[in-house]
Image (spheres, grey):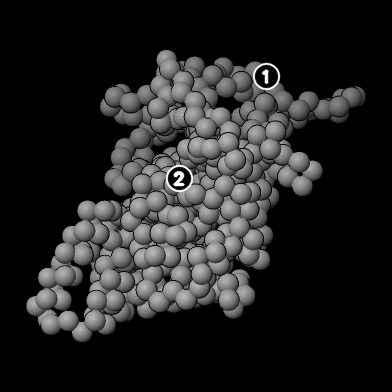
Amino acid sequence: MGADSVAGFGAVVAVFLGVFTVPTAQTFLTLVQGWVLCLGRPTVRRLVSVVDGKVKSLSAYARFFRCARWEMQEVWRLLVVEVLVPWFAPTGRLIFATDDTTCDKFGKRVAFAAIFRDAVHSSGGRVVFHRAHCWVVLSLQVRLPLWNKVISFPVNTRLYRKEADCDAAHPFRTRQQLALEMICEVATWLPDRQIELVGDGAYPCEELVVGLPREVSLTSRMRSDAALYELPKRPRRPRPGRPRQKGRRLPTPERMARRAKDWKRVKVLMYGEERERLIWTRRVLWWKVSGAVPVLLVVSRDPGGKEDDDFFVTTDIQADPAHVVETFAMRWGIEEVFWEGKQLIGFRKVQGWRPRSVERQAPFALFVLSLVKAWYVHSVALRTRPEELPPTSAMLTALRYAYWQQRINRLSLPGREKCEILKAVHNALAAAA
């Protein structure tokens, strides 16, 4: 690795230059490289300080986020259409995961910061609140058969604003509505593809399910005490009045699972390994969530009885039940994205406080994360085929090392001295990641 790796990563970054004007494109290249190389808090000053050959003033780089004329949505579109889908999912159904997370923010002048529940420090008997930004994130989930692993690429974001921060230009949107906006946007980018959206139990709601495009289905977890109904039966003879929209009330999913007899034993891929599960399904109406739209209830049971039953739901009533279980397991990749973004790439440490900067800097961090993962998997891992796919921290270290190796090589140091310096640089970068 070295000059070839840097050139390969540069070729990926070059895909996005058309979004910017010529001067802004140079700023973009510098900031992407700086974001990769920066080992601490990604302030604009630190991002620029680690880049070799910078030619602009510091204020020019700060204006890139604050007021430059470019749109983050166009950057996300190119990432999906020109890079991720052609490289990793050229055919078949696309699976996207959605979830929300908070990032600590301090200071009264930070735009859109508000009080949210801290999911990390809260527990069943104790709720902790903190001042933060809340981001709803959409990620593309890709299964890599060579390593039997799912890798997640962030591909879209929305900042959740509380009602006090909304206005006529930005009306209030719930997290579910923001997720719907993002998946509808992605569907317009990929008009000929079938899409499956997977989210946790907080996301199934009427406004999301009813608003999904025809080519998009939703897979999620269902409450064990959900109010379900039979599908309405067609009367043998026409009757006056409006036809029935739902059948009789059914027991809760938990009670139906206890009474179920016709379980099917299947093997599913979950969390990187093959597991046996007992599957039971039924088509139902989840009236509160999907209205008159039928959904498929899928109950997954551990044959050994060590784990509690899982209750899943999908709007694709023709779906293979084993696929539903596997798809929901793939959702875990977005949780890894949140950890990687916060711990490795500075997603929660960005310093912008003006509205425009807030809306751009944190998503830019996740964008760089997707670039690094896409570059490594496509240009390094699929070429060298290691026994195991390394963690994202190792991918980031490899790219940083390639940049520093190229820079040190230009110094034309004696061979032995250069090797010692490169070894020290590699160890320092690995420890930082």
Residue 412 vs 318, above or below: the answer is below
Dot 2 amino acid type: Arg
Q: Is residue 100 left or right of residue 74?
A: left
Note whether residue 292 is visible. yes
What's the residue at 43%, 17% (across, down)? 126
Tell me residue 137's x, y (percent).
Answer: 53, 47
Tell me residue 384's x, y (percent).
Answer: 25, 70
Residue that label 1 marks? 248
Give the image quarter of residue 36.
bottom left
Which of discs 2 and 1 lies nearer the camera? The answer is 2
Residue that label 2 marks? 348
Tell me residue 119's x, y (percent).
Answer: 45, 30
Q: Nearer the viewer, residue 356 or 221?
A: 356
User: Is disc 1 placed on a helix, strand or loop?
Assistant: loop
What's the residue at 70%, 23% (across, down)? 247
Q: Quadrant of the N terminus?
A: bottom left
User: Is disc 2 placed on a helix, strand or loop?
Assistant: loop
Residue 190 vs 170, above or below: the answer is below
Note whether residue 134 is visible. no
What's the residue at 42%, 15% (across, down)? 125
